[in-house]
Amino acid sequence: MDKLNELSSRITTRYDDERHIKTPIDALSLYVNPQKTDMMATLYEPSLCIIAQGAKEVSWGDELYQYNAGMFLLASIHTPAHVRIIEASEAKPYAGLTITFTLEQIFEVIKEIDNGSEPLSDMQDSLYFATMDERLQDAVLRLVRLLDTPEDIKVLSPLIIKEILYMVMRTEGADLIRHYIREGSLTQRVVKAISDIKEEFSEKLSVKELAKSVGMSESSLYANFKKITRMTPLQFQKQLRLQEARRILLTQQVEIAQAAFEVGYEALRSLAANIPACSACRPRKMSSTTKADKKHKKIYASIALF
């Protein structure tokens, strides 16, 4: 059995009708799905996402990316996107995993390996797709194997995660982070702006004030923000608001007007007006516990896209 087949086997054997599988390794989560899915909104955090079996599509900005078994997605910063599983079946379910990283872990590794060297290229996108090499496959497999020996997790998992970080941080995909750790760099300022929006997405956003707070001109912030996230600052905020509104409606028994208010919209029509069209998306049913009347059905269906 090769490494990729062993990895998918170890992931799928832990499937018990629960698609998101938490593990005793805090940074590691597994995902199994025997069915293809419609487009769903997600917010990538700094992490490494790996497909062991099956395939996915990621809609990000105006682009549609496909990545398959043996490939990884490196998310350098918090990034809203839409994803769907396009290859899965009962016989061969989709199987993947996510390893999340703290910025402290990332900086520690980069500072040890870079020795002040310049990034490989100019400011990069916040999502990076590539194929795992044998060394990375081996390290990821060793991390998953630790689930069979819980007594080893506390000591060995941090070492293996650092090894994995070391390998992915040597790729071009880590250049955004290399730019970020350079004091006063444009990337550092843009990432600060992204963090500020994420922390206060329900508040009214003034791009002028945001640019001033991170020491950039409006035009520079707009151009560099879009280069990294494929969105303008206002579009980024809207995505965060819509995703939070969707989460509230799926998990809480509230009226849609209340959800709209909680995410920063003063009126229901404001929420409806900010639901963008998504040609790759199809409506899904909301939770049966959600209260909705006929007047709001179209808005619910639209939010279900995200």
Image: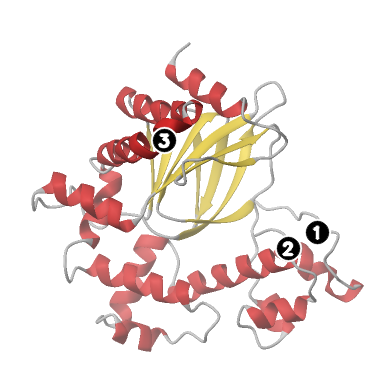
Location of residue 222 in the rendering, given as x and y in whole percent from the top left corner:
36, 74
Mark identifier at residue 232: none
Location of residue 81 in the rendering, given as x and y in whole percent from the top left corner:
53, 56
Task: Kindly indicate whether the residue at mark 2 contacts the one at mark 3 (C-beta within 8 angstroms).
Answer: no
- Residue at the top extreme, as displayed: 1
Mark identifier at residue 287: 1
Q: Tell me which label, 1 or 3, sits earlier in the chain.
A: 3
Q: Tell me which label, 3 or 2, sits earlier in the chain.
A: 3
Assign a secondary structure to mark 1: loop
Assign a secondary structure to mark 2: helix
Location of residue 71 in the rendering, given as x and y in whole percent from the top left corner:
43, 33
Residue at position x 38%, y 66% from top? 226
The answer to which quarter of the image holds residue 91 is top right
Q: Is 9 drawn above or below residue 167 in the view shown?
A: above
How would you rate the neighbour count of disc 1 (Cα within 10 Å): few for under 14, some for 14-19, many for 20 or more? few
Camera-side mark, 3 or 2 = 3
Asked whether residue 5 appears in the rendered view, the answer is: yes
Between the C-alphas of marks 3 and 2, the distance is 33 Å
Task: Kindly indicate whether the residue at mark 1 contacts the one at mark 2 (C-beta within 8 angstroms).
Answer: yes
Residue at position x 13%, y 47% from top? 114
**Quarter occupied by the C terminus:** bottom right
Amino acid type shown at disc 2? Thr
Location of residue 33 in the rendering, given as x and y in whole percent from the top left corner:
66, 35
Residue that numbered label 3 is attached to:
153
Q: Is residue 19 left or right of residue 205?
A: right
Residue that numbered label 2 is attached to:
251
- Residue at the right extreme, as displayed: 294
The answer to which quarter of the image holds residue 189 is bottom left
How would you rate the neighbour count of disc 2 (Cα within 10 Å): few for under 14, some for 14-19, many for 20 or more? few
Camera-side mark, 2 or 1 = 2
Amino acid type shown at disc 3? Ile
Q: Is residue 146 left or right of residue 165?
A: right
